[in-house]
Image (cartoon, rainbow, N blue to C red):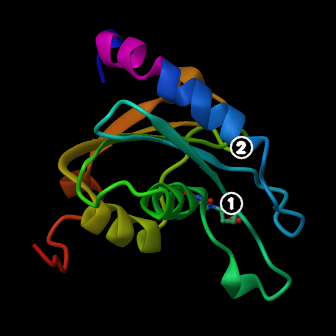
Amino acid sequence: MTDQHVHDHQHLLDEARLAAQATYSPYSSFPVGAALLTAEGDVVRGCNVENISYGLTNCAERSALFSALSQGALPRTFKAMAVYAPKVPLISPCGACRQVLLELMAPDAVIVCQGSDPAATRTWTLDQLLPGAFNAF
Ligand code: THU
């Protein structure tokens, strides 16, 4: 990832950091925030929301996507998502979220991920995150 990309995505990462403050994660104590950039340039935030029945947990990435669609955004129009998690040096989306990201984001969308070590920040394409995916398109 180039410095230019870091600069371009800094605002989105800042939004993801703010999104993490809304986390409901009493079971894992692992806050995660996501910020989704829409085709119109709006930012929609999401955080992880846990449940005492642990399997019902919703990751920050899916929270942001589902929130954006619920607000009327169209699938496959999202240009970028930033993900922030302070408890690891670098966060990487889980397998379930990768499948959902692939279906709902624009084909050329990028995912910018940051943890506690800003120098470790990475940007991945959807194809890099889920090569050879089961794809509806
Ligand atoms: N989590 C996310 O929200 N996004 C990720 O990319 C990885 C994991 C959440 C799920 C759970 O609430 C907590 O982090 C620990 O796994």
Which secondary structure dominates the residues rendered in magenta? helix
Find residue 124 and report its horizontal and vertical position in percent: 30, 43
Residue type at tag 1: Asn
Find residue 22 and report its horizontal and vertical position in percent: 78, 47
Residue occupying the point 32% across, 19% down: 5
Magenta stretch contains residue 5? yes
Q: Does the beta carbon at disc 1 come under 8 Å from ligand 1?
A: yes
Q: Is residue 44 above or below residue 42?
A: below
Distance from label 2 to label 1 (Cα)?
8 Å
Q: Does the beta carbon at disc 2 come under 8 Å from ligand 1?
A: no
Whether label 2 touches label 1, CB < 8 Å: no
Classify 10 Å Cα crowding around label 1: few (below 14), some (14-19), many (20 and above).
many
Residue type at tag 2: Ala
Find residue 109 and report its horizontal and vertical position in percent: 24, 44
Q: Is residue 137 above or below residue 25?
A: below
Q: What is the quadrant of the N terminus in the image?
A: top left
Residue occupying the point 19% across, 73% down: 133
Find residue 90 and report its horizontal and vertical position in percent: 55, 40
Q: What is the quadrant of the C terminus in the image?
A: bottom left
Residue 70, label in figure: none
- Quadrant of the rendered structure where residue 54 is? bottom right
Residue occupying the point 41% across, 23% down: 9
Ligand 1 lies in which image quarter?
bottom right
Q: Which residues are magenta?
A: 4-10
Name the residue tied to disc 1: 48
Disc 2 element:
helix
Name the residue tied to disc 2: 20
- Quadrant of the rendered structure where residue 99 is? bottom left
